[in-house]
Amino acid sequence: MHNPIIQALEKAVRARGADPLITWYGTASGARTELSVRSFANWVDKTANLLSSWEVEGSVVVGEVNRTNPGHWMSLVWPLAAWQAGCTYRLGPDPSAAVVVRGPLDPAALPGQLTVACSLHPLGLGLRDLPAEVLDFSTEALGQSDAHYVRPVEPTDPAWIDADGTRTQSDLLVDPQPGRTLVQPSDGWQALAAAVIAPLIGGGSAVIVDGELEPTALARLVATERITTPMA
């Protein structure tokens, strides 16, 4: 079988590729980034191909960035790319992991593990002056092919591991969300499920407010973005 979320992404690209999937607001910077279904899928493809270029398909990828920055759009790309490459995505440390994905604030390399740093820049710009043996995600991913290849998996293969336990490939589906949902990230799975998985399955989209926003500004954003589901 193929990962069910990747199948939902493939279907969404065919049906509504130009439609928005994620609108990300960084409250600290005031930045707004919108990714269409097709643009998000392209980042997933490039990142999955990056994993393939490292010959780590089917291994464990540790997503520290989803623990420290669960709502950033770069963080949301990584789990789907890992699933597309047949990998398990884990939020906690794992000495057996092939790859560790970190944010920009603590990008030190881990011994024996390929370490990737995400800039978390609104437009996906890369990082400079990284420590030795740490790779910049944007630079590495944007140099990859746009080809779409999905590695088959088994329904019982672990797909997502966090403090709450393990979700297998067949445990990833959530209730579909057909509308435009406001998402205020609280943890890795909540952000991923509400901002990506539910809209992909239901034909909707998500507006992610990444950080604190005072009530008046939040109400204004809800009206401006035509949000139909107040919060997830």
Image (cartoon, helix red, strand yellow):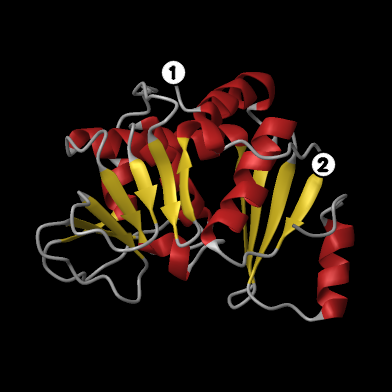
Residue under the point 50% across and 59% down = 164
Q: Considering depth in this image, is 3 or 148 the residue closer to the camera? A: 3
x then y, percent, for residue 159? 42, 40
Residue type at tag 2: Gly
Which picture quadrant has residue 38?
Answer: top right
Could you tell me how far apart the alpha carbons at marks 2 and 1 are, in whole angstroms? 29 Å
Query: Could you classify mark 2 by the number of other residues whose Cα lies within 10 Å: few (under 14), some (14-19), or many (20 or more)?
Result: some
Q: Is residue 201 left or right of residue 121?
A: right
**What is the x, y in percent for residue 56?**
20, 38
Q: In the drawing, does residue 163 fall left or right of residue 29? A: left
Q: Is residue 20 visible?
A: no
Q: Which mark is residue 1?
A: 1
Please indicate whether residue 101 sits to the left or right of residue 206 in the image.
left
* The C terminus lies in quadrant: bottom right
Question: In this view of the protein, which residue sits in the foreground, 14 or 175?
Answer: 175
Q: Furthest-bottom residue in view?
A: 214
Along the line of sight, which residue is nearer the eye, 192 or 163? 163
The percent coordinates of residue 124 (x first, y second) are: 44, 55
Query: Image point 37% across, 25% down: which residue?
Result: 153
The residue under the point 21% across, 69% down is: 130
**Dot 1: within a 10 Å radius of its alpha carbon, few (fewer than 14), some, or many (20 or more) residues?**
few
First-in-chain label (2 vs 1): 1
Q: Residue 17 falls in which quadrant of the image?
A: top right
Which residue occupies 61% across, 56% down? 190
State the SS at label 2: loop
Quarter of the figure that contains the N terminus: top left
The amino acid type of the residue labelled 1 equals Met
Helix, strand or loop for disc 1: loop
Residue wearing tag 2: 179
* Label number found at residue 161: none
Q: Is residue 179 shown above or below 91?
A: above
Query: Is residue 85 visible to the viewer in this orientation of the structure?
Result: yes
